[in-house]
Image: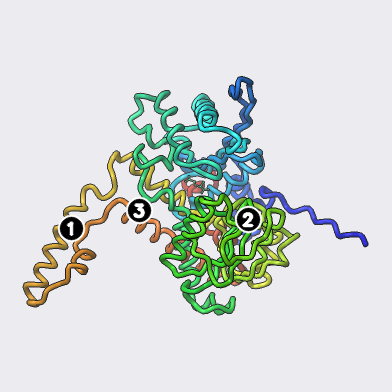
Amino acid sequence: MIKAKPQQALSFYDSVQAYFDKAAVHTGLDQGLLDQIKVCNAVYRMKFPVKINGGVQVIEAYRVQHSHHRSPTKGGIRYSKHVNQEEVMALATLMTFKCAIVDVPFGGAKGGVAITPWDYNEEQLEKITRRYTAELIKRNFIGPSIDVPAPDYGTGEREMAWIYDTYRTFNGEEIDAAGCVTGKPVTQQGIRGRKEATGRGVYYGIREAVNSAEDMKKVGLEPGLEGKTMVIQGLGNVGSFAGKISQDEGGAKIIGIGEVEGAIYKPDGIDIHDLIRFRKETGSILNYPGATNFSKADRGKVIEFECDILVPAALENEITVNNVDKVKAKIIAEAANGPITSEAANILVNKGVLILPDLYLNAGGVTVSYFEWLKNLSHMRFGRMEKRFNQNIMAEMVNVIEEKTGKKITDIQKQTLVRGADEIDLVRSGLEETMISAYHQIRDIMVRNPSIKDLRTAAFVNAINKISSDYLNLGIFP
Ligand code: GLU
């Protein structure tokens, strides 16, 4: 018997273009304006030499600025062997729409270095990062008012600190130099809550969606996150925080996890903290007590696990025409960028699956990056001015209540009442507000327009409309 050949899945870039086109028809905007909003404005492809183990290696890297309708442009830097021009263009495009959805006043950008980071030691990675930054500086592709990188797959606080230090070395006089990159360590002009931000935003987005009784009825679930089963693909920064917070604050029951070494399934629940500890100790999620193992070759099966909410939190193109029929989840929460190709997404939407789209759901990272950038430009920690003032007012209020009622307020109650907000409280509150209001903006567009059948199309419509008004205000378009 001849086995059916797997179909060629749509590329990530083509998917993003298809998502845009699908939404553009609902905006009624001039084609020229839509063309301008869709294209990548600037693509910088570079190759540079780095001395590694006595020999020279030529490193390939990119920075793409998708849209200059607002400044600076903003987006992470990815270190992965899969990095190529099209991938970075797709990711930069998503950043533009992501920023518009959460009202972060930036254009979209993305960077990529085509290396496998764990093939290099710390010293070598530092060399590569500093050289990449120098290339960006040379071409004016980085700066607090130009283009502001951040972490992405394969990078983190450490790399951001190297970028900041390199930038500062070249721009010693610049008072706002710290705003040249976000996701820095808190001790080096970073902000509290940035590391968890994308995962926390994913949690707020899921929570908002599952709280709608009407939407849950459509997928055959009760409202509320408590007790809902969740499967997570990828335990990197985003997946692990999304899982921890959904379990601890939302009461979600995590029953499956996928990682590079394999996947595990345990329908009676996995404590995510315990699993992370187990993986640290053993080097793998496999053989976690009580769970069924899926080997490295079968790790893709994680997207087929029976569950309420599937959270792809790894890389793009995980769900394609070749495996979409096997997906059993009722809700897919796109914590990663581009985990579903546009063809597969159409199939899922027609089947009634609720998809929380990447450009909304993982926008928590760039939202808190915006707060960090503001902190850097203001040269002051959030909460510094008002914390004590608010605390004193609250203490006075408690005294007055006790005096007037003649009743004592307990110490535990006092602890929660008499408190001024710290930076972390304000960051979380700003993020929560952003994710909730963005969700309702998108959902309202979908509800008001019956020809829009999914949240992704509604999210793109929302973003395109916001960006178009910037262009129209500039007077470039009639
Ligand atoms: N890399 C993250 C993203 O894809 C964060 C970008 C940023 O903070 O600028 O959204």
Q: Nearer the viewer, residue 214 or 121?
A: 121
User: Circles 1 and 3: CB distance less than 8 Å?
Assistant: no
> Which colouring convention does the figure follow?
rainbow
Assign a secondary structure to mark 3: helix
Taking the image as shown, residue 358 lies to the left or right of residue 165, namely right
Q: In whole angstroms, how far apart are the C-alphas of marks 2 and 3?
A: 27 Å
Q: Name the outermost residue toward the right.
A: 1
Assign a secondary structure to mark 2: loop
Q: Is residue 455 visible?
A: no
Name the residue type under label 1: Gln
Could you tell me which residue is drawn at 48 percent across and 50 percent down?
99
* Crowd around label 1: few <14 · some 14–19 · many ≥20 (10 Å): some
Name the residue type under label 2: Pro
Q: Nearer the viewer, residue 278 or 186?
A: 278
**Residue 396 x, y percent position in the rendering:** 11, 63
- Identify residue for label 1: 391
Q: In whole angstroms, how far apart are the C-alphas of marks 1 and 3?
A: 18 Å
Which numbered disc covers residue 358? none
**Residue 366 x, y percent position in the rendering:** 46, 49
Name the residue type under label 3: Val
User: Circles 2 and 3: CB distance less than 8 Å?
Assistant: no
**Residue 224 x, y percent position in the rendering:** 47, 74
- Identify residue for label 2: 339
Could you tell me which residue is drawn at 49 percent across and 54 percent down?
363
**Residue 178 x, y percent position in the rendering:** 37, 35
Q: In whole angstroms, how far apart are the C-alphas of marks 2 and 1?
A: 45 Å
Which numbered disc covers residue 427? 3
Assign a secondary structure to mark 1: helix
